[in-house]
Image (tube, grey):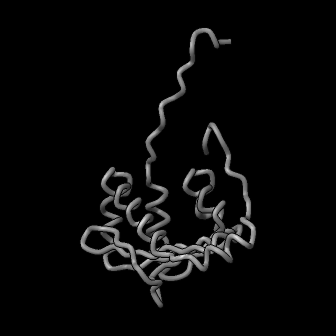
Amino acid sequence: MSEFFSIPRFKLPRLVAAVGAKLPQWPHSLALATALNAAARAGLLPADSVAMLEGRTFVVDVLDAGAHASFTYRGGVFRPLWQLPQDPDLSFSARLSAFLQLLARQEDPDTLFFNRELTIVGDTELGLLIKNMLDAVELPRLPQRPTLPIFRH
């Protein structure tokens, strides 16, 4: 959990989802695949686990934003899918706040899943692999704010 901020549970207004669903979805897929490739290159994702994703398709659905991203892992690279796959190997659905809490490590996938804030559909073993991979990610620590001598208590 962050020492500086906490992400509250929230739900975007229905209008956001209505408008978001009408927009092109491929930019979300491109952005997520790019971010995953950057994380893999930075060594944040365990290489042995990532290799087990070969040929698998994934969908991330942000319910209250009317947005989804779909991608696959082929040839050692995360690749965006330009169209939503008919039958993805694994699909994640949640509100934006739940995904942000996961990203910030404020909540773990199990808690969100058992509180019915995160839905996971598809290959159970693949879902467990992804969960373990997320748990193994060691995010770099940001440097502490320097304290100026005149502001010390």
What residue occupies the far top of the structure in this picture? 150
Above or below, comparing residue 118 to residue 98 in the picture: below
Q: Is residue 66 visible in the rendered structure shown here?
A: yes
Above or below, comparing residue 3 to residue 152 in the picture: below
Q: Is residue 118 visible in the rendered structure shown here?
A: no
Q: Residue at x 50, y 65 (%)?
A: 131
The percent position of residue 75, horizontal first and vertical second, equals: 24, 72
Q: Residue at x 33, y 71 (%)?
A: 52
Q: Residue at x 46, y 70 (%)?
A: 27
Q: Residue at x 60, y 80 (%)?
A: 22
Q: Nearer the viewer, residue 25 or 152?
A: 25
Task: Indicate left or right for 44 with 74 as reference.
Answer: right
The percent position of residue 101, horizontal first and vertical second, equals: 62, 55
Q: Quadrant of the C terminus?
A: top right
Above or below, comparing residue 37 to residue 86 in the picture: above
Q: Quadrant of the N terminus?
A: top right
The percent position of residue 58, horizontal first and vertical second, equals: 45, 77
What residue occupies the far left of the structure in this picture? 75
The percent position of residue 24, horizontal first and vertical second, equals: 51, 77
Q: Nearer the viewer, residue 137 or 143?
A: 143
